[in-house]
Amino acid sequence: MKTGQILNYAGTRHEIVQVSDAQITTRLVGKKSSALNTWSKTRLAFMLRAQQVILERRQFWKQGLHLTPQPKAVGSR
């Protein structure tokens, strides 16, 4: 992640304004006097990955892939 990069999280856009060894500082895009948010790198990475997993699962269910017939295990009724 680098300065100036835009992150989409929970329906809002955040611009990275500062990156240090352990923390990332962001501000909301489109707000003139928005407060700065400071995130730990590990926490931010976890939140963005969790959001991605949720979107992937939503897509999986929308496509109906959970409805495809599964081969029966041998010996099951």
Image: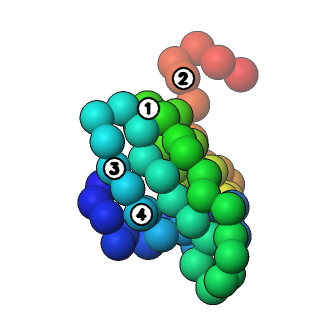
Q: Nearer the viewer, residue 39 or 50?
A: 39
Upstream in the sequence, badge 4 or badge 1?
Answer: 4
Disc 2 residue type?
Answer: Ala
Upstream in the sequence, badge 2 or badge 3?
Answer: 3
**Crowd tier of the residue under label 2, counting other residues whose Cα lies within 10 Å: few below 14, some 14–19, many 20 or above:** few
Upstream in the sequence, badge 2 or badge 4?
Answer: 4
Left or right: where 41 falls relative to 27 = left
Upstream in the sequence, badge 2 or badge 1?
Answer: 1
Disc 4 residue type?
Answer: Val
Disc 4 to disc 1, C-alpha distance:
17 Å
Q: Nearer the viewer, mark 4 or mark 1?
A: 4
Q: Which residue is mark 4?
A: 17
- Which corner quadrant holds the N terminus? bottom left
Q: Identify the residue at image location x=31%, y=64%.
A: 3
Horizontal and vertical percent position of residue 16: 43, 63
Q: Which residue is mark 1?
A: 42
Say above or below: 22 vs 38: above
Q: Which residue is mark 3?
A: 19
Q: What kind of element bears circle 4?
A: strand
Q: What kind of element bears circle 3?
A: strand
Upstream in the sequence, badge 1 or badge 3?
Answer: 3
Do tag 1 and tag 3 residues touch (Cβ < 8 Å)? Answer: no
Disc 1 residue type?
Answer: Thr
Q: Which residue is mark 2?
A: 73
Q: What kind of element bears circle 1?
A: helix
Disc 3 residue type?
Answer: Val
Q: Identify the residue at image location x=54%, y=23%.
A: 73
Q: Nearer the viewer, mark 1 or mark 3?
A: 3
Horizontal and vertical percent position of residue 65: 59, 57
Disc 1 to disc 3, C-alpha distance:
13 Å
Please say whether residue 27 is visible from this viewpoint: yes
